[in-house]
Image (cartoon, rainbow, N blue to C red):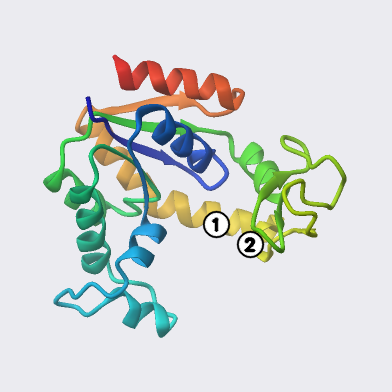
Amino acid sequence: MSHRILLLGAPGAGKGTQSAKLADEYGVEHVTTGDALRANKEMETEYGTPKSFMDAGELVPDPVVNEIVEAALDDADGFVLDGYPRNLDQAEYLSSITDLDAVILLDVDEEVLVDRLTGRRVCDDCGANFHVDFQPPEEPGVCDECGGELIQRDDDTEETARERLEVFYENTEPVIEHFRDEGVLVEVDGEATPDEVFDRIADIVES
């Protein structure tokens, strides 16, 4: 049975981690907006190609993002969607093109999110992710995968983390309410361990 799963949650809530585990467990596609845009950047829409906006350093307009995501979902035999929809218009579009089996919100307190975001370290060479508290490297500052230097990204400082969360709350609260009003939203405590969170999500998906 193919599953069609939407994961919602603020930056730092664990969407990427849980989406990857779900995709592996159920043999479905892990669809993110960024990956879908990169994979289809030459796709012609009535508004132009995603590449034309990306090359200009502009945000890709909603109608283009919608078409790209729809194409990615059409190609997938089951999916877990991560990072879309980001606003109410996208949420309404998504509801019009597919029936979701599960819409899951990872609920995490803001201070916990800030701690998670500011503690992230990324390998400057291979891009592997670590965390000073939750997933530390064997040797501080050194990537376990390739031996590269671990850095804190500019968007992982506390000031930037709080700005990102503010934008998320402003844009995505209507999305959460949209799915809550449809009666399909289920909230999961995202502050448990990754394995516990996954088990709870799996129970919802399989129920």
**Furthest-right residue in view?**
139
Residue found 31% across the figure and 54% down from its top = 87
- The quadrant of the image that shows the C terminus is top left
The foreground one among 147 and 88 is 147
**Furthest-front residue in view?**
146
Residue 150 appears at what percent x and percent y? 77, 56
Residue found 31% across the figure and 45% down from its top = 175
Question: What residue did someone put label 1 on?
Answer: 164
- The quadrant of the image that shows the N terminus is top left
The foreground one among 172 and 65 is 65
Q: CA distance from mark 1 to mark 2?
A: 8 Å
Local SS, label 1 = helix
Closer to the N terminus: mark 1 or mark 2?
2
Question: What residue did someone put label 2 on?
Answer: 155
Residue 144 appears at what percent x and percent y? 77, 46
On screen, residue 49 versus residue 128, left or right, reads left
* Amino acid type for the residue under numbered disc 1: Arg
Local SS, label 2 = helix
Residue 54 appears at what percent x and percent y? 39, 77
**Furthest-bottom residue in view?**
56
Q: Are marks 1 and 2 in contact (CB under 8 Å)?
A: yes
* Amino acid type for the residue under numbered disc 2: Asp
